[in-house]
Image (spheres, rainbow, N blue to C red):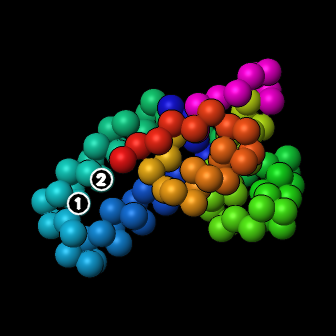
Amino acid sequence: MVTSAVAPIEAASAVQRRARVGELDERAVRAMMRRMADDRGRWELIDLEAAVLARVESLVRDVALATLDAVHIASALLLGEGMGRRVPFVTADARQRTAAERANLEVVWVE
């Protein structure tokens, strides 16, 4: 899996947020955090370098995206440009999906 360097932080935050509102119990939180830690060794993280941040700024200004959505989309766009092809962009967020489609990413919708 290739993703933005902020993805592990964002994922942990999402798990903790779901726990705070009662959607996950402590056992589920521990299991999910353990699974992410185990999987993390197979994640390729795209650093927030100047080229990514410039694209993020452009996306936020031109498409009116939330910052972290723009980080993920910009990372995918630059990865695809570096590879010379469209890359799959996996999301379960409807707003992010719409923005990724507008950016011409190959969106894989997860429900």
Please give the count of numbered marks on the rendered protein.
2
Q: Position of residue 53 (x, y in %)?
A: 80, 55
Q: Secondary structure at mark 1?
A: helix
Rendered residue at 53%/51% (across/down)? 7
Q: How far apart, in angstroms, are the residues tagged by discs 2 and 1?
A: 6 Å
Bounds of the magenta segment:
81-89
Which amino acid is tagged 1? Answer: Val
For the residues bearing labels 2 and 1, Cβ distance under 8 angstroms: yes
Q: Is residue 20 magenta?
A: no
Residue 33 - label: 2
Tell me if residue 49 comes above or below residue 44 in the rendering: below
Residue 40 - label: none
> Residue lying furthest top in this view?
84
Nearer-the-camera pick, 33 or 77? 77
Residue 29 - label: 1
Q: Position of residue 88 (x, y in %)?
A: 58, 31
